[in-house]
Each structure stands twice: as structure tokens, then as C-alpha cells.
Amino acid sequence: MALQLVVLAAGEGTRMLSDRPKVLHEVAHAPLLHHALRAGLALGPARVALVVGHGGAAVGAAAREIVPEAAVVTQEERLGTAHAVSVALPEIAGAGGDTLVLYADTPFLREETLSAMQAARAQHDVVVLGFEAADPGRYGRLVQAADGTLERIVEWKDATEAERAVRLCNSGVICCATALLEELLPQIGNANASGEYYLTDIVGLARAGGLSCGVVRCDEAETLGVNSRADLARAEAAFQARARAGALETGATLTAPETVHFAHDTVLGRDVEVEPMVVFGPGVTVETGARIRAFSHLEGCHVSAGAVIGPYARLRPGAEIGEDARIGNFVEVKAAEIGAGAKVNHLTYIGDAEVGAGANIGAGTVTCNYDGVSKHRTVIGERAFIGSDTMLVAPVRVGAEAVTGSGSVVTRDVEAGALALGRARQETRPGLGRRLMERLRAARAERG
């Protein structure tokens, strides 16, 4: 059955105290909106409608980064969740199948949970996602009938003391037939304590029409919403805890898990070792048996099997590290391919470059890739030996098994097997060093 996805992202997020729309604040280097969309997209919806408000252009652009065909509609007045869904209704009307309503500030819903809601539609006309809250607080309550079906949803402001004692709470996520949504939305009123049009009233309307309503339960952690900076910090902590546990369960070793920070899309192979204080930015894949040593930062890169990175290394976007390669302390690699078994061990910058298999890059080497206007590429051949403190002024090529002398500035191509020296001739003046120092010390003494 076709599925339509409606994602509500119109909230102003005033408690965030930010010029940025709330749903564009990030958890694990991805906007809250992206997390919510990915959960819904896993079900393969035929149509996606996003309801925006504050900062709508930016929110819509962010949504289209992962759903180019998403319909973006604006809720000009904030009159409640039912009103927000009604704004999206023209985008899904007549589409048939089911409609699933999600919230862009709820990033942790799992595909399995949403699939369970879809499956429950076989027994119920309306399905609501609920959770047992440790502290129900001001959540809306799900009131069930004796047979376990859902009788009504009561907002905290409108609930009696008996209803507030119920611990089964409303997440706000609803799945029902698109046609039923079209029929019932216009019937929802705003005769409540907030004067808003609540989507939750659809349950009472469905029951009044003799339809069946049911509840799918999930863990409370999945329903965590973000409304403040403190909530955002809690969401980040929850994501990291889940990501660390997942890495350990799939065969990675984290020697100090609480100090390792993952991005939303980090992939670690089996037998990867990650030392303390490692940060993974977006777009990182580390293959089987690689080792990421302490205090390293990786982003937008691929590390092949058996490679060792760090300590104190930085891999930037476009870094491709070959099998059994070594990237050592205080080495930065950007938009560069490091061949199998190559070594870049100390205090070096390799940018916009290709380093052949088995090459050795000496300490302090820099690929001088930027001329102030454009970037240029350096190519270093297999088994080449680049002496310490070599400046490679791109564009330049160093052939296979070539050698550059320490301290050289290489501005022209070096053929395979050649030795390149590009430094001034050394001059030695006997006794001059001692006399120079004596004069300097005497001058300082005269100044007092």
C-alpha cells in the first residue's frame, strides 16, 4: 500500500534562543530534520510533504538535500498540529494509501517502530505511537478502552486527575488512511484550553464514527524531542551512547568509548581499533583491522584495511588512505590518495595529491597546493623517498623511486629514480659563529 509522509517542521523553537530554525540544529553532524526524514524515508513513501514556518526557505532547502522531490508548504499561522497537517493536505489528497505524520524535532524514531505502525493498520483505522514515560509530566495521555483499543487522547491541560494518572503517553506520531485523514481533518475544532486544532482529536472523531484506533508502543528514548539547547545536548549524548554501543556490538574496539564521538553516518569495520579522544565527522568509513590512534579527527575520508592513523592526525574530506598505510602524528591529509603501505609519519601536510604505494614522506614535508587563486596537484610515485622538510610546489610530479634531498624546494618534475636537490649551497665561516655570539652578548650587556 502506498505511503504518504507528512513531516511537521514549522515550530519557531523560541526556547533555542537562536536565529537558526530549531530543526536545523544538529545532532551527530546532521540536522534534526535529516534524522526525522531518514526514519520516514526508510519506509519508501510515495510522496513527502514538509510543513515549514520560521526560516522556511532554509528548512525546505535542507529537506531537499535528501528528498529532492519533497513538497514544501508553509504554515503561515501556528494554529496547532491539525492545522499544520491540513496545510499539507493538498499535496497528498487523492493519493490513497496511508499517511504517516512525523515531527522534524524528534530525531530518534527507528524504522522498525514506524514499520510496526504500518503493520498495525491492518487491525486499526488509526494507529498512534505511544510510550510509557518515566515521568509523564505534561505529555498528552493515551486513554485505552477495556479491550486495549485506543479510546481517546487527552492533552495534559484538558485532562482530569484520573487521566493524568495514566502513564501511557502520546508521541504525536499518527498513521491512518489518507482518505480518512481528508475526511476527519475538517471536523477537528479548537474548543480546548489552548484554542488550538489538535491532530490528536482525530482519534475521538474516528471512534465516534465507529472506527477502530490502536496503539503501537516504543521505548521512551525514541520519542525524545528537542526544544532547547539542553534538550539538544541530551539528544547528542543519547545518539553517541547508541553509536558507541552499536560499534562495539559490530566488532570494533573502543578503548575509552565515552571519549569517542561519532557522526550520523560513521562506518567502522570489524576489528577496527579506536583509541581515546577520537572525533569522526560526517562521511567516514574505516575498514577492517585499521587503527585510529588517540586525538585524531577524521571527516569525509576512507581508511582502508590495516592502516594506522595518528595519534594527533587529521584526515579532511577527500582523504583516501590505502591498505597498511601509516599517517602519523600531526599529519594533515586533504583531497589526497595515500597508496598501500605508504608512510607519512610526522608533521606533514599532504593536500590535493597522490602518494604512490610504498612511498615514504619525510617529516615536515608540505605539498604547496595553493597559489592564492587556484589549487594544484602533486603526484608522488611508488616507493619514492621524500626527504624531511621538502616543499613540493604544485603542480609537480616526483617519479617512482625518486629521492628528494632534505630541505629541498621542488618546483620542477623529478623523473623516476632521480635525486632532486633544490636548496642553497651551504657556506661555513670558521670562528664566525663564536665571534657573532660574543658581539651580541656584549651589546646586550651595554643596554643593561
Image (cartoon, rainbow, N blue to C red):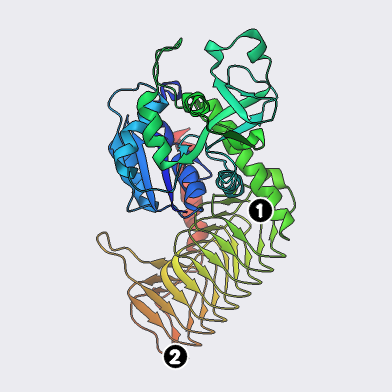
Give residue 347's position: percent from left, percent from top.
54, 61
Q: Three-letter amino acid code at disc 2?
A: Ala
Q: 106 or 375, which is in the foreground?
A: 106
| CB atoms of marks 2 and 1 within 8 Å | no
Disc 1 secondary structure class: loop
Q: Badge 1 is on which residue?
A: 294
Hey, which residue is sitting farthest front in the picture?
210
Name the residue type under label 1.
Ala
| Residue 401 in view in this figure | yes
Ranked by sequence position, the earlier of labels 2 and 1 is 1
Number of numbered tags placed on the structure image: 2
- Residue 416 circle label: 2
What residue is shown at x 40% (from left), y 17% (from top)? Answer: 196
- Answer left or right for 377 relative to 221: left
Q: Which is nearer the eye, 317 or 225?
A: 225
Q: Is residue 263 above or below residue 302?
A: above
Whole-percent x, y for residue 289 in the image = 69, 68
Residue drawn at 61 percent across, 49 percent down: 112
Instruction: Give percent across and percent down for residue 332.
Output: 50, 60
Mark 2, secondary structure of its residue = loop
